[in-house]
Image (spheres, helix red, strand yellow):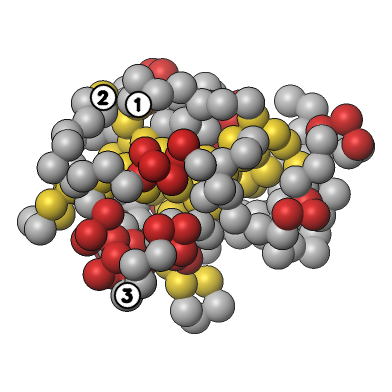
């Protein structure tokens, strides 16, 4: 419950969030997906700052049959070929935007889906954006977090390591124990251990039955990087 109490801190209580440099990002999709747990997403809006700790990610490395890039370049995924730390935004099922972090050297398509955040600053703004006062429903799941943080298609290709309104950061609060399991809502490469999450955090999304100890799951050629 400490995570919920932290999330309900006053929005006027400013946190120190340091902007991440591209050179700090691990040059590997799977390693970066794990590295991002405990890091921050910040969106500076005219109405105020929104920020949250990343508590769940999914990796979609090069050659992944479940990735949008598997069949090669298309105009829709052009941003996936940018340098690590850029945003790839896609519209899922005609209903939700989803935030991804590009994860391989420029010219190689791969990305990490940010599945859930623990809200930190701008709680009241998030509640208005999501039309709910329930803290756990603000950013638990990729569609919800994009709505709460007002992330849209025009953010596609934005450099999250550069000065701008939407960026990646680091706070002093380190991540707790990190779990690893299968990804959610895919049919190809569905057995790969490419989903990372902070154990015990109530803002983690997805069926609880998937949050199994790593030892009970079979390692894969993707997940063993």
Quadrant housing the C terminus: top right
- Callouts 1 and 3 close, C-beta under 8 Å: no
Sequence-wise first label, 1 or 2? 2
Q: Nearer the viewer, residue 83 or 199?
A: 199
Sequence-wise first label, 2 or 3? 2
Marks 1 and 3 sit apart, C-alpha to C-alpha, by 28 Å
The number of numbered badges drawn on the structure is 3
Residue to which mark 3 is pinned: 131
Q: Is residue 188 left or right of residue 127?
A: right
Give SS at disc 2: strand
Q: Nearer the viewer, residue 213 or 193?
A: 213
- Callouts 1 and 2 close, C-beta under 8 Å: yes
Sequence-wise first label, 1 or 3? 3
Residue to which mark 1 is pinned: 170
Q: Residue at x 21, y 44 (%)?
A: 10
Marks 2 and 3 sit apart, C-alpha to C-alpha, by 30 Å
Residue to which mark 2 is pinned: 18
């Amino acid at each position: 419950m400490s995570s919920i109490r932290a999330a309900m801190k006053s929005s006027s209580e400013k946190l120190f969030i340091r902007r991440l440099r591209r050179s700090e990002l691990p040059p590997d999709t799977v390693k970066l997906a794990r590295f991002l747990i405990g890091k921050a997403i910040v969106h500076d809006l005219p109405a105020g700052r929104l920020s949250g700790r990343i508590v769940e990610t999914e990796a979609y490395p090069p050659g992944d049959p479940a990735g949008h890039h598997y069949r090669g370049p298309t105009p829709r995924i052009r941003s996936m070929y940018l340098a690590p730390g850029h945003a790839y935004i896609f519209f899922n099922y005609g209903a939700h935007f989803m935030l991804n972090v590009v994860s391989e050297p420029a010219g190689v398509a791969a990305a990490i889906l940010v599945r859930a955040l623990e809200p930190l600053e701008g709680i009241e703004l998030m509640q208005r954006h999501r039309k709910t006062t329930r803290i756990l429903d603000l950013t638990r799941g990729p569609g919800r977090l994009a709505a709460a943080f007002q992330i849209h298609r025009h953010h596609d290709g934005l450099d999250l390591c550069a000065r701008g309104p939407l960026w990646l950061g680091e706070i002093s609060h380190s991540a707790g124990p990190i779990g690893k399991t299968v990804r959610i809502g895919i049919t190809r490469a569905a057995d790969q251990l490419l989903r990372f999450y902070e154990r015990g955090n109530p803002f983690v999304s997805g069926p609880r039955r998937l949050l199994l100890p790593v030892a009970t799951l079979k390692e894969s050629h993707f997940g063993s990087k």
